[in-house]
């Protein structure tokens, strides 16, 4: 059965736009207003999306169901697999009693919660995004922050917000490579263009992260550290994206930022230590007990005095951290070396989906001519980032001298705890796929493209919408990259700018993507609070995409010489 997508099913583009919005508006309502649990909201939204696809778009029921199931399968692997492995690794450290040593070692560098957020949520999270992407930074960094005493809800929210600027270059440049493939624009050129947009956001995010936590006065108090962290990242991101290509900006920028901030903290300390209101003294603290409500202050000297009572040897601290250090090495190997990728690919199974593969045709103006929509499932057993994390967890069993019984019990506990988040993730990816294969996503994109000379403002919003729908900047670029190119040619704006804006705007939608929210709540033990987390991140997401939109308009009409 063959079927060609229709992008204006009602004959009126405004009405078709509203129809395409129905599943998204329901999802917003279910999470933000009704405060429905994520897995229930996800399942109901998918059902509504299928009905819209069949009733309004005329999509055959069999194709609608198959595309949804394919999306759900891709939600469970590789994304769900990353979450399971990441939470499992964190729980092993807790079970072995090593997380207390990790927390003490971080406190020995700085007891200040603001600086801990910069180190872990922003710099370390950016490294994980660059090396693995697909939810890994939120899962690992969120668990780490919750483990060292951050309120789990705010640990999740801060990591979602921090995981913004690195996303365009995530997973060794995957989003930019995808944009280049669909648009025909050289990936190095796109890397240069994005590298002339995102560094502004990269320098701003650390400031905004601390402002959310501590307010204006307490943010200014650590402004030197914020500048070191943000500017070192932004400058490195600009240089690497413009002169080395799309693969290395995240890894290089995160390492430079992490090292620069750690060295800076050796010679500088804030006047007072920021802790959360009602937070217990460090020597009495247990993971996940602090309550975020404002700030409680102490002096640097008092913090140092408290830490003297918790001395640990370098060997003990190294042992506690070694699984996460090993994780950095393994993820770097998995994502950074083509020879390793090729070796791992021998264990990859990929097959077309019978009845769906090439049965749907994309039409103009989304593509230049009728193009079959491929549909295949890829099971990269060894190549998936989740497998890299699981291998780390396997080695951790020996590092921590953990009995097999405890190791296996912890894995089973992890699966039980994550059953609802996995349902939500499968549902959300099912929604993404039914929106893409039915043409609903294209309807939304064409509505944005119809704004003419105003389109440079809306181009990042299109990328933002794509990431919200799919949970991935890579997928958003694959979905809308060619549309951005076509629209640029029609309105006389350099297509390179607009394709890049799709990716730069897309990164700001990552924090509100249901997929990302499900990862964050699962990693920090906040299952059931997806709606609250969505409301928390939404206003920040809108602010960030507005910043990118303004930058894009300026580059289109005021400083167009900046376009490579």
Image (cartoon, rainbow, N blue to C red):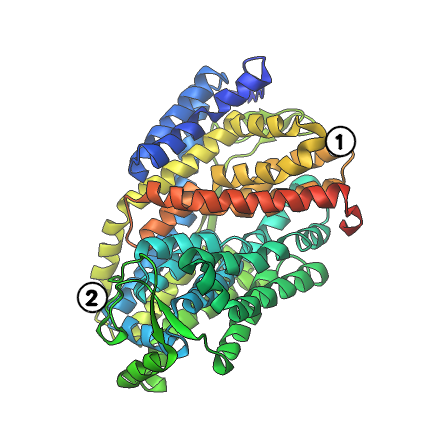
Residue located at (62% from left, 35% from top): 458
Q: On the image, numbered disc 2 is attached to which residue?
A: 406
User: From the viewer's perspective, is the residue at label 2 or at label 1 nearer?
Assistant: 1
**Real-space CA distance between mark 2 and mark 1, rounded to the nearest whole angstrom:** 62 Å
- Residue lying furthest top: 11
Residue 190, percent from left and from top: 69, 50
Q: Residue at x 29, y 81 (%)?
A: 306
At which x and y percent is residue 564? 77, 51
Q: Quadrant of residue 203?
A: bottom right
Q: Is residue 524 above or below residue 39?
A: below
Q: Are marks 2 and 1 in contact (CB under 8 Å)?
A: no
- Horizontal relation, residue 507 to residue 96: left or right: right
Identify residue for label 1: 491
Closer-to-camera residue (39/385): 39
Residue 547 in view in this figure: yes
Label disc, if present, on residue 461 of the rendered structure? none
Q: Where residue 311 sits: x, y (%)?
A: 30, 85
Q: Residue at x 51, y 63 (%)?
A: 127
Residue occupying the point 44% across, 18% down? 54
In-front residue for pair 213/102? 213
């Amino acid at each position: 059965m063959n079927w060609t997508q229709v992008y204006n099913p009602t004959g009126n583009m405004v009405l078709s736009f509203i129809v395409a919005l129905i599943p998204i508006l329901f999802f917003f309502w279910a999470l933000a207003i009704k405060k429905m649990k994520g897995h229930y909201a996800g399942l109901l939204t998918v059902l509504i999306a299928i009905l819209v696809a069949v009733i309004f778009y005329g999509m055959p029921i069999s194709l609608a169901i198959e595309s949804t199931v394919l999306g759900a399968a891709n939600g469970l692997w590789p994304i769900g697999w990353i979450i399971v492995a990441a939470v499992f690794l964190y729980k092993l450290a807790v079970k072995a009693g090593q997380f207390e040593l990790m927390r003490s070692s971080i406190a020995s560098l700085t007891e200040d919660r603001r600086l801990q957020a910069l180190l872990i949520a922003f710099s370390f999270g950016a490294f994980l995004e660059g090396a693995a992407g697909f939810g890994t930074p939120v899962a690992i960094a969120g668990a780490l922050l919750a483990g060292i005493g951050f309120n789990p809800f705010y640990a999740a929210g801060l990591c979602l917000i921090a995981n913004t600027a690195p996303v365009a270059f995530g997973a060794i440049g995957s989003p930019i490579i995808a944009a280049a493939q669909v648009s025909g624009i050289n990936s190095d050129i796109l890397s240069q263009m994005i590298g002339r947009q995102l560094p502004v956001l990269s320098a701003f995010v650390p400031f905004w992260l601390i402002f959310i936590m501590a307010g204006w006065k307490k943010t200014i108090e650590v402004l030197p550290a914020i500048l070191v962290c943000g500017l070192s990242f932004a400058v490195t991101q600009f240089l690497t994206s413009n002169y080395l290509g799309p693969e290395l900006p995240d890894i290089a920028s995160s390492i430079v930022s992490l090292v620069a901030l750690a060295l800076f903290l050796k010679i500088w300390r804030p006047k007072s230590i920021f802790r959360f209101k009602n937070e217990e003294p460090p020597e009495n603290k247990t993971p996940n007990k602090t309550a975020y409500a404002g700030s409680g202050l102490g002096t640097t000297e008092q913090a140092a005095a408290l830490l003297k009572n918790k001395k640990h040897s370098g060997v003990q601290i190294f042992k506690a951290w070694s699984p996460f250090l090993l994780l950095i090495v393994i993820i770097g190997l998995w994502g950074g070396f083509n020879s390793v990728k090729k070796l791992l690919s021998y264990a990859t199974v990929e097959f077309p989906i019978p009845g769906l593969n090439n049965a749907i045709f994309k039409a103009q103006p989304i593509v230049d001519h009728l193009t079959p929509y491929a549909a295949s499932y890829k099971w990269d057993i060894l190549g998936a980032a989740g497998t890299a994390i699981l291998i780390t967890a396997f080695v951790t069993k020996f590092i921590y001298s953990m009995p097999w019984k405890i190791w296996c019990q912890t894995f089973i506990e992890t699966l039980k705890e994550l059953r609802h988040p996995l349902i939500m993730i499968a549902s959300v990816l099912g929604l993404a796929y039914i929106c893409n294969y039915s043409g609903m996503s294209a309807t939304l994109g064409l509505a944005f493209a119809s704004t003419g000379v105003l389109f440079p403002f809306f181009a990042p919003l299109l990328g933002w919408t794509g990431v919200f729908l799919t949970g991935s900047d890579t997928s958003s670029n694959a979905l809308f990259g060619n549309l951005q190119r076509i629209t640029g040619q029609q309105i006389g704006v350099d297509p390179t700018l607009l394709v890049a804006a799709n990716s730069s705007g897309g990164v700001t939608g990552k924090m509100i993507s249901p997929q990302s929210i499900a990862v964050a709540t699962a990693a920090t033990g906040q299952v059931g609070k997806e709606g609250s987390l969505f409301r928390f991140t939404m206003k920040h997401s809108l602010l960030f995409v507005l910043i990118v939109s303004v930058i894009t308009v300026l580059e289109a009409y005021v400083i167009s010489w900046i376009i490579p």
